[in-house]
Image (cartoon, grey):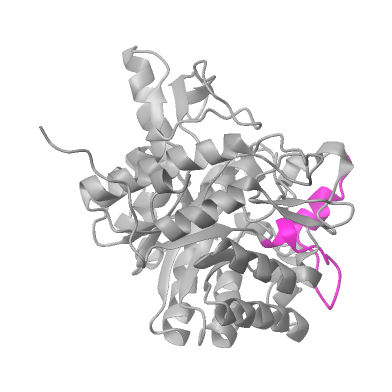
Amino acid sequence: MSQPVEPRAGRDFLWGTATAAYQIEGAYNEDGKGPSIWDTYAHTPGKIERGETGDVACDHYHRWADDVELMAQLGLRAYRFSLAWARILPDGRGAVNAAGLAFYDRLVDGLLARGITPFITLYHWDLPQALQERGGWVNRDTAASMCDYADVVTRRLGDRVKHWITLNEPHISSHHGYVTGEHAPGLHAFPLYYPTTHHLLLGHGLALQPIRENVPDAKVGVAFSLSEMQPATDRNEDFDAMSLGDDFHNGAYLDAVLRGRYPDSIATAMPEDVIQGNDMAVISGKTDMIGINYYMRLLVRAHKDAPGFEITPWQPGPRTEMGWEQYPQGLSYWVRRIANDFPDHDIYITENGAAFPDVVDDAGRVDDQQRIAFLRDHTRAALETMAATQARLKGYFVWSLLDNFEWAYGTRPRFGLIHTNFKTQERIIKESGHWYRRLIEAGSPDDAG
């Protein structure tokens, strides 16, 4: 009988946290920054829970040095953050805002001074409003604008930043922004899934060239939103729906970037004029790492309307405050699948975390044992799978460093290892943050207490 595999990471494993610019920076109209689609969307009545906006969020733009000090207290080895495109290029392309670039200069230098490796995400959903007014991701030219943007920032920061993520969750950008309308820019038309998906991925492919030219030793990839799909019943049509769901949520993005083609179900539905010339070769240019953003599995069943499936409720079991099922086996599934399908790529879990109804007690502590249990289960699942499969898993990033502005939900859901008082901007490291520091030191969730 084989011995159980010990879930332990080596000293070079990059334990980190992740954030996004719009969710934490605030300073939405300061120092020359232009408006983004999220500024516009959040200022539209009825779009955000409780009428909140990200105008201030965590005020990270002004408090970044204190936040970097908190990262050091957590013992972080890496920090994944995004750049606000409109802070650097207020019109999306063209004139560069020097003050915006200078902010990220200071942040990068502050991280490196504390031994924290920066991972930069170029696009985490906050497209400059000026580009949206020209069609946003429906417009093919937005992909060319992303290439210009990548050139500007890698020329400035590439001497110090070696890990670059072009897109965060392109599926969510396309589906939530253009199909369901629950995210900016708030459009609601299923056919837009196809051009927006393709143009987002084309933006990734075009951005690869300036990144490679400006940062010859760069490690580049995409942070994919990945959900294990399972049939809601044992009916044959629901197994077919599971396959369609996997193509729509996962395969369209993985296959295009890593295999140079769309799954057949996506390719046959793609309008004829969307894919042009050597687009697929551009999209599938050389990448080095694959980011797994994992939160949940999805149960699907057949549906008569396009795209041929629908998501069904989960079975009874533990939930996060978002109502999402807690299912660490899905993270094991994705580490294994990526390792099997793309063995030449490094793997990073670029987001994993959970919201719970945290409270500050009379002693000023946030004793978030639910989050600790969640992180223990998920890190154990990832490390056990890494050991069992020899997957090239190189790092894990908790979502999130801070309680932040959680998109359409506003500031109500709290995902952070650090509690944010949004009235005073006071930060408190939660018990999960202290637990995570012990995990980093020990390398094993079973030794973190």
Is there any visible trace of residue 413 in the rendered image? Answer: yes
Give the residue at the far front of this rendering: 363
Left or right: residue 150 compared with residue 348: right
Residue shown at the point (45%, 23%) measured from the top left: 300
Residue 96: image quadrant is: bottom right
Q: Is-magenta flag for residue 396? A: no
Name the spot of residue 83 as percent of width and height, x first: 64, 69
Residue shown at the point (70%, 44%) measured from the top left: 183
Q: Quadrant of the N terminus?
A: top left
Nearest the eye: 191 or 70: 70
* Residue 337 drawn above or below residue 130: above
Name the spot of residue 85 as percent of width and height, x first: 68, 69
Residue shown at the point (40%, 40%) measured from the top left: 331
Nearest the eye: 360 or 157: 360
Q: Identify the main secondary structure in magenta.
A: loop
Left or right: residue 19 compared with residue 50: left
> Count the marks: how many?
0
* Residue 16 drawn above or below residue 335: below
Is there any visible trace of residue 169 in the rendered image? Answer: no
Nearest the eye: 187 or 63: 63
Left or right: residue 394 compared with residue 129: left
Name the spot of residue 278 as percent of width and height, x first: 37, 66
Image: magenta residue range:
21-45
Name the spot of residue 258 as percent of width and height, x first: 33, 57
* Residue 2 drawn above or below residue 421: above
Residue shown at the point (31%, 49%) measured from the top left: 338
